Image (cartoon, coloured by chain):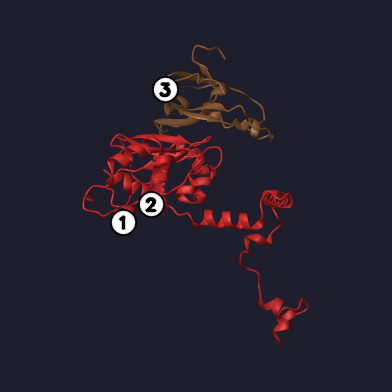
Chain colours: A red, B brown
């Protein structure tokens, strides 16, 4: 049998051997309405000369290159530098720019966890998220379940994430409904006084900057 | 763009505006009372931008703090203690206003 035979539509043997008991790739089904709109919009923008295909590719590449480590560096610096922390809480976008992270024109609101208040971020209307700081949002952040339940029963949702918050803490949820974007500034874990900036950065995960968990090494009680 | 109407600590009530247009004011705060947490600046009106207009002049945007118990006490006893939501000024009424 030649390799051409394998790819022939009339090759009964290969059809019998290749049983389709696996899930087909996502892009093999019919085009969804959202995909059709996206393709039409992209073609129109290119056709009218507003953007070129290269610019779209570059932008997708930039967005895909951003990881939560950017946000972690901001948090670690705020833990080490009280004056920076003060500027960060006053104007998140300007403070990030000091570190070469340009979020403009989006205003970043930084909300600080304290011994009294634990902050959590959600977008109940869609999936607003500080993408230029943390990269693309996780799938669960965009789910209807998270978007509704995190306000109605946040402690239950956090337990499902394995986060057992001190019941004394007051929970404040920030609904990202319009033009602000949010970053939770977690509390610095105890016993990290001698940590370097790199060691501190390692403790700061994406999820603790959304507020559904605490930094690594944190002790809940 | 008009001067901001509310300042931090002002008590406000969110309007109830029905209709199918695109709004950024979630249903769960419509008709409810809250307190201005901060003024966020002026931003284009998303309701007009959604139908191809410029959304200008820009409108004052605030963060309004609501009590979870006030909003959802009939639903759950485990609600968030407070919820901060961004609301455009044209949705906000002074508490004395009769909407």
Q: Position of residue A117 (x, y in %)?
A: 33, 35
Chain letter for mark 3: B
* Residue A198 circle label: 1
Instruction: Left or right? Give the position of B98 relative to B48.
Output: left
Chain letter for mark 2: A
Chain letter for mark 1: A
Residue A214 visible here: no
Q: CA distance from mark 2 to mark 3?
A: 33 Å
Please name the residue shown 39% across and 48% down the image.
A99
Q: CA distance from mark 2 to mark 1?
A: 13 Å
Please name the residue shown 44% across and 20% down the image.
B7
Reading the image, the residue beneath label 2 is A205
**SS assignment at label 2:** loop
Image quarter hosting the N terminus of chain A? bottom right
* Residue B8 circle label: 3
Instruction: Left or right? Give the position of A209 relative to A51.
Output: left
Image quarter hosting the C terminus of chain A? top left
Q: Position of residue A218 (x, y in %)?
A: 28, 48
Please tell me if label 2 and label 3 are on a single chain: no
Please name the residue shown 33% across and 55% down the image.
A202
Please name the residue shown 36% across and 51% down the image.
A73
Q: Based on the displayed image, in which of its 4 quarters is residue A61 positioned?
A: bottom right
């Amino acid at each position: 049998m030649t390799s051409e035979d394998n790819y022939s539509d009339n090759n009964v043997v290969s059809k019998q051997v290749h049983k389709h008991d696996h899930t087909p790739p996502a892009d093999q089904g019919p085009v969804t309405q959202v995909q059709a709109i996206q393709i039409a919009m992209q073609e129109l923008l290119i056709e009218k000369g507003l953007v070129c295909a290269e610019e779209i590719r570059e932008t997708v590449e930039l967005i895909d290159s951003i990881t939560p480590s950017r946000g972690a560096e901001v948090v670690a610096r705020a833990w080490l530098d009280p004056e920076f922390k003060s500027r960060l809480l006053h104007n998140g976008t300007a403070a990030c720019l000091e570190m070469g992270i340009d979020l403009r024109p989006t205003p970043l609101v930084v909300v600080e966890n304290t011994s009294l208040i634990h902050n959590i971020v959600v977008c109940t209307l869609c999936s607003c998220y500080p993408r230029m700081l943390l990269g693309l949002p996780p799938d669960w952040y965009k789910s209807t379940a998270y978007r509704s339940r995190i306000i109605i029963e946040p402690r239950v949702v956090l337990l499902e994430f394995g986060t057992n918050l001190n019941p004394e803490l007051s929970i404040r949820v920030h609904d990202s409904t319009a033009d602000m974007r949010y970053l939770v500034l977690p509390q610095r874990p105890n016993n990290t006084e001698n940590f370097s900036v790199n060691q501190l950065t390692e403790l700061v995960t994406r999820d603790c900057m959304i507020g559904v968990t605490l930094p690594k090494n944190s002790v809940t009680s | 763009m008009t001067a901001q109407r509310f300042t931090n600590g002002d008590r406000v009530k969110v309007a109830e505006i029905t209709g199918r247009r695109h709004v950024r004011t979630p249903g769960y705060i419509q008709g409810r009372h809250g307190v201005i947490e901060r003024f966020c600046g002026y931003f284009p009106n998303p309701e007009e931008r959604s139908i191809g207009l410029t959304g200008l002049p820009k409108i004052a945007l605030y963060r309004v703090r609501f009590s979870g118990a006030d909003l959802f006490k009939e639903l759950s006893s485990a609600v968030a203690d407070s919820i901060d939501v961004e609301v455009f000024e044209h949705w906000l009424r002074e508490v004395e206003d009769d909407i």
